[in-house]
Image (cartoon, helix red, strand yellow):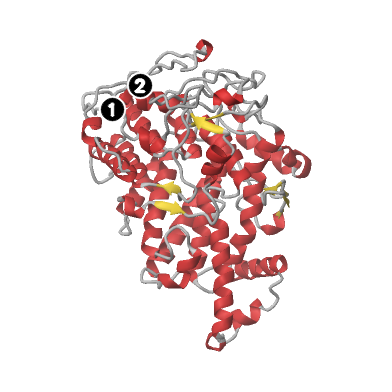
Amino acid sequence: MILKNHIFKTVLCLAACMAFGCTGKFDDLNGDPYGITDEERERDNYKIGSSIIGMQSFVLPTKIHLHQFQEVLAGCAFAGYLSQTPEWTAKFSTYNPPVDWSRAPFNDVITGIYPYYENLLYAEEEVVYALAKLLRVTAMHRVLDMYGPIPYSKMDSSSSEGGEVDDDGDLQGGTLTAPYDSMEEVYLQMFEELDEAREILMENYSFDQQIYYNYDRVYYGDVQKWVKFINSLKLRMAMRLRFVRPALAQEMAEDAVSHPGGLIATNDDNARFFPSLNNPVYEQVHVWGDDRASADIVDFMNGYQDDRRSKYFNYAVTEAGTSTGEYHGLRNGTDISDRENATRYSSVVVASNDPMVWMNAAEVSFLRAEGALAGWAMGGTAREFYEGGIRLSFEQHGASGADDYIASSNTPNAHTDFQGKSEWNHAQTTTVTVAWTDAASDEERLEKIITQKWIAIFPLGIEAWSEFRRTGYPKLFPVVDNHSGGTVSTDKMIRRVPYPDTEYNENRENLYEAIKMLGGPDNGGTNLWWDINR
């Protein structure tokens, strides 16, 4: 059994007790466990369970405005998934977001998650400790890949101050005072934490999942599925380092694939979080009407005649409000002058009670395909995993025609705006086909893998944008309107989100050290540590 650092845990207990006012916890920890009453145990389980759900709610944020800033306005726009319809003069997709937009994905996630994290670290059940470590990595690696160096190794609740809650119940404007770690340092620590969590869960493989069934909205206390998720997440993170630390990337990837706990290999094991309120994408698309399908993904899927289109998108509509019977996407990075017409582009198929998918089997299969292409021991060939990933995606969405799709020689479409806005038209960006060709170059086959993964993981915008930056694929349309003032190249596209203004005001000394680690100016044009190919 893994031995935890008891001094460290005691410090965390003190910090958590100060934060939550739980002055009697030490007696519970040091007393006779058989003396705990059923009522006390139920109360502790509720407290622990609510903290598990609290951490899970920050992986893909469930608070609607935070989700909007992080996942849709930034991630999905940068990844070519969704475009915005309001007549905003400043936004992420035109590379000039308002300061509070850049603030939320950094401050609100970091300051929001740590009280829950510390509450779980000193729980008596080791499985809870492992989940705390795992969920922190799951949430924070996404923040890391948006901004670059972040506060991590020295971060606890005493290093942050939560923001105020607005009228919609969303946390706004928390601040930090913690030192930063370089991206490399954070990745190395995250791998260690994943291994630690995995070992604990393997030692508790027969854990009674009913104990936390009501407090885990992903796998409902199923330890074996959490182990598969750990290995799959480790594989995802390993692949991110393929070009910057190739030996380490291969070591971590092969460890994840060979581990006896397995990977997410079927759609039954997909990591899906069920929010207590409406799915945030549903709210933003169908209640607010703020977002429509991006021209990028629609033109790729139209060109491929992809039968998943009807599972992803609705038909565009005419001025009279009737269906066009066709899928049409809205170019990204456009200055919208007529919101009503902008909402006529294809919307997203999503129900109010749909879960939020963190990771699916198709992504894992495509990761293994890329690993096999690189010569790593992935348990099969690149072609097997590539075609397997497509089949898994079609199965996940209940779409037909996977075999015909796999054999297709179709190519993505050029973009022709269906409302006649010729200035938004763009030539075809690639002629890559779906069909696998063993004789093709490694680069062409990599483009196939990443392009199909991009389609399969919709709408995981942060992940898709990260892989676009890492590999250069898929070949997206450039933004129509670049308002970055020259800090972001239209051709190269945005590489990161700048640090929020609150860090300059509240954490200036530590921030300046972080910018040194970043290796370039604090703007959207600076490449991250693992982003070395473009």
* Circles 1 and 2 in contact, beta carbons < 8 Å: no
In front: mark 1 or mark 2? Answer: 2
Give, as a three-letter code, the residue at label 1.
Val
526, above or below 104, in the image: above
Asked whether residue 379 appears in the rendered view, the answer is: yes
In percent of the image, x 51 and y 15: which residue is there? 424
Give neighbour class at mark 2: few <14, some 14-19, many 20+ (Cα, 10 Å).
Answer: many
Place of residue 16 in the rendered image (x, y in percent of width and height, measured from the top left) = 67, 66
Amino acid of disc 2: Pro
User: x, y percentage for residue 62?
Assistant: 56, 50
Q: Quadrant of the N terminus?
A: bottom left
Q: Nearer the viewer, residue 33 or 413?
A: 413
Q: Position of residue 66 (x, y in %)?
A: 62, 44
Q: Is residue 474 visible?
A: no
Picture residue at 36% right of the left edge, 51% below the top: 256
Residue 314 in the figure: left or right of residue 184: left
Task: Please tell me whether residue 479 is drawn above or below residue 245 in the rendered image.
Answer: above
Viewer-proximal residue, 85 or 98? 85
Q: Residue at x 69, y 65 (%)?
A: 15
Label 2: state its secondary structure.
Answer: loop
What label sits on residue 13 in the rendered view?
none
**C-alpha gap between disc 1 and disc 2:** 10 Å
Q: Residue 384: x and y, percent?
A: 23, 39
Mark 1 vs 2, N-terminal side: 2
> Which quadrant of the view contains residue 96?
top right
Query: Image height check: is 511 above or below 448?
Result: below
**Residue identifier under label 1:** 434
Secondary structure found at label 1: loop
User: Crowding at label 1, few (<14), some or many (≥20) Cα neighbours within 10 Å?
Assistant: many
Looking at the image, which is closer to me, 493 or 4?
A: 493
Find disc 2 in the rendering and name its residue.
412
